[in-house]
Amino acid sequence: MPLKPKADRRSAAKCVLPRSKSRAGGRLGRLRAVVVAGALLAGLSPVAAGAPQAAAVTGHKGDPTQYWNKVLLQTFRNARGWDASPGKLSRSGAMVFAAIYNAESAYQYTYGTLKYQPYLSRPLKYASKSSKPRADEEERLIDRTAYRMISELYPNDQAYIDARYEARTGRSPHAPDPLDRLVVDRVVRQINKARADDGSDNPEVYDGDTTTPGAWRPTGEEATEDEGACKEPSDAVTPNWGKVKPFVLRSGSQFRPPSLRGFTSYGELVNSPQYARQLDEVRRVGAVDSTERTYDQTVVAWFWDHDLNGTYHPPGQLLQLTGTVAKKFKLDTYETTRLFALSALSLADAGIASWDSKFDTPINEWRPVSAIRATGGANADWEPLSADRSGAPWTPCFPAWTSGHANFTGAWATAMQHYFGRDDVSFTAHSEDPHTLVPSRRMNSFSQVAEEGEFSRLWLGVHFRWDAEDGRQIGTNVADYVYANALQPTQKGRPDQQ
């Protein structure tokens, strides 16, 4: 059973119905209103009375949230440029699953079974107490909400998204459905309003110090067909993501350490014994030709990588894992929407917190490849295990501290631990990284995911140990906070209060 954290005390804004924009739309809206009103007077669900008969027979198979997660992950694979950055992808995931959860919450509240508060809003009721739902009403709500959100986030994939909707429902996504005006429009508008002007489209490029030893600088990779270049400071990926408005946290800096292990200047950092030990370790175990890295460590390194375009990237791998765990526990539709929402919100805020530590602290730490080569001699040509699809050395184009992978896996594992009230859960994790040595591996606990995600980056040669350790701690703190402050159990007798 999930743990019972403290209730969230944030206030929420009410949603309003959209107005029809054309005469035809107005006539259709008035017609639907008459149908709905008649249904309510008759004690029926307005959805049952107003839905096209074709909607009664659909191609629905399996859990709807699981289905749309697979669709979303394909859009992640298709993304390029900054749209494929961890922050952008985790933001999309949070928007999609928060919307699905809120649509499901409307269904549960309407029919008297609401157990958890919606995200950022009061529960939405769209029928009378005596109304009865159609057999397919719950799934239609999720299908149409997911379709709308994913379509708006990834318009270039519209043909694919349309095809997946039709494959699932047996209907065109453009066919009218009374659920749109009653619920879907309102939910989608509420999520979009919450994310409007959140800073996620900030186009400013990096202009920080890239010459002082210890300071991040481009790692020198040329652009390939699928990957961007890292030749100029302006190539740094999403340098302002730490300033993006979080989904649940008060700010991206809420769990920021004051500085990297207390160092406040690059000179102090690179001349310290601690740094020397960190440098030596990654030089030995993270090199492409390392003789100290074990086979198992190499397996783990590649299994959790997913840096390259064409994969579902770290947020996608963890959302897939969310689905795996939900299926293992045979969660019902309602609980599945909540688990996905908690997981996605934690990942999104973890991404923001990670980028805050990367770019908005006194030290924007250089990558191991820059640090090791700067020592000269035999290290001048050092190469990390990490590589692009051609096998050429490749390092993500942003500062090292803290590790985003460790942050994400730490947040995911903590969210799962809270939800299920335990850590010792076994399941099979999957990898689609082009270099992975195994496509699937058995996990014996949620914390195993966090630990492997944490140190995979050291063994790939793209992070120092403290990047991984501190990243995991931030991710853990983020998920603790999200679980304690979002999607809380309803208060007895006051289900409409947030």
Image: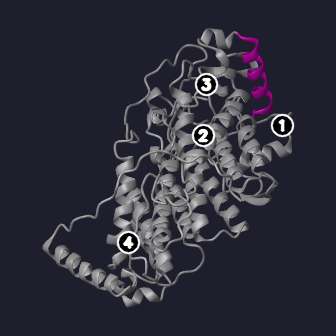
Q: Which residue is mark 1?
A: 293
Q: Which residue is mark 4?
A: 126
Quarter-wise, where is residue 280 in the image?
A: top right
| Residue 449 image position (x, y, % from top left) | 74, 48
Disc 3 on helix, strand or loop?
Answer: loop
Q: Of callouts 1 and 4, which one flags the residue occurring earlier in the amino acid sequence?
A: 4
| Residue 144 image position (x, y, % from top left) | 42, 71
Q: Is residue 91 left or right of residue 314?
A: left
Up/down of 357 relative to 411, above or below: above
Q: How many marks?
A: 4
Number of the label disc, if any, that sits on residue 478: 2
Q: Which residues are magenta?
A: 272-287
Disc 2 on helix, strand or loop?
Answer: helix
Q: CA distance from mark 3 to mark 2?
A: 13 Å
Q: CA distance from mark 2 to mark 4?
A: 34 Å
Q: CA distance from mark 1 to mark 4?
A: 59 Å
Magenta segment main secondary structure: helix
Look at label 4 and name its amino acid: Tyr
Q: Nearer the viewer, residue 170 or 378?
A: 170
Q: CA distance from mark 2 to mark 1?
A: 31 Å
Look at label 3 and name its amino acid: Pro
Q: Nearer the viewer, residue 65 or 440?
A: 65
**Which residue ends up furthest to the front in the rendered image?**
493
Q: Of callouts 2 and 1, which one flags the residue occurring earlier in the amino acid sequence?
A: 1
Image point 77% across, 56% down: which residue?
438
